[in-house]
Image (cartoon, rainbow, N blue to C red):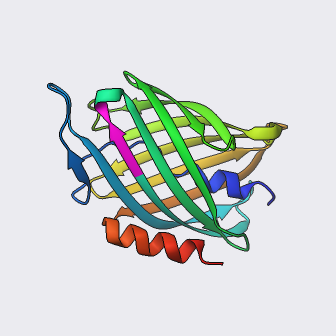
Amino acid sequence: MTNSHFVIALGLFLTGCGSNLSESTGGSPGLPASKVEFFYGDGTVKGPYGEDYGTTKTVAQRAIDPATSSASEDVVSVSSGQPAREFVVSYAINGSKFTMVEKNGAFTGTGELVGEAWRWNEWRSHAILAHDQGTVDSDDHENGTTLDATKTYYQADGSVGAVISEHLEAITYAEFETRRAELLKP
C-alpha cells in the first residue's frame, strides 16, 4: 500500500483528557493548565476487503495549551516494511472545532471535539493528504489512559484504500524517549 505512511501518522488527535501520566504547567485563570501527554501502542492495517496489510507502532507527544487555544503533536510511526516517519502537527482550536497543519506539508485538516472543553474524550477528524494522495477520516476515543482510533484512508478516486485500528496507552516521558529512539533507529 503506497500511502500507508501518511495514514498511520493520523492516529492520535487531541485527547486533552486527564491522563495520569501527563505533565501539567500553570494555566490562565478559568482555564485548565497546559499539559504534555505521551502515548505508545500498535495497530493493524487492513485493506478495503479485510486483507492484512500489516501492523503499526506509534509513539506520540502531545502538548495542549488552553490559554492559546492550541495544541501540537510529535508523532513517530512505523508500519510493516516501511521506515519510520515523523510528523509534527499544529492545531488551532475554536470551541469544539479544530484545524490541523502538518509542519512539512504532509496533510492539513479539520475536526470536531466531543466532551468537556479541554478534557475531550472523543473526536473526529478529516485530513487531506498532500499531492492529491487522498484523505483520511479518523474516529478516536480516549478512555482514561488508553486511546483507540479507527482511521479510514480514501484514495484520490474516493475508494477505500485501508482501514487502520490502533490501541495506544499513556506512557511516561522517559518511556516516550526510549520508544521514540527505538522507532527512529535505522
Q: Is residue 12 visible?
A: no
- 115 relative to 74 in the view: left or right: left
Give the residue displayed 37% in from the left and 46% down from the top.
63
- 122 relative to 84 in the view: left or right: left
The answer to whether residue 55 is above or below residue 35 is below
Query: Looking at the rendering, which quadrant does residue 15 occupy?
Result: top left
Residue 129 x %, y %: 72, 40
- 131 relative to 82 in the view: left or right: right
Say whether residue 130 is magenta: no
Part of the protein shown in magenta: 62-66
Query: Looking at the rendering, which quadrant does residue 168 occupy?
Result: bottom left
Closer to us: 16 or 26: 26
| Quadrant where the C terminus is found in the figure | bottom right
Give the residue displayed 81% in from the left and 58% down from the top.
2
Q: Could you tell me what secondary structure mostly forms the magenta stretch?
A: strand
Residue 112 x %, y %: 46, 29
Residue 96 x %, y %: 39, 24
The answer to whether residue 164 is above or below residue 14 is below
Give the residue displayed 60% in from the left and 58% down from the top.
86
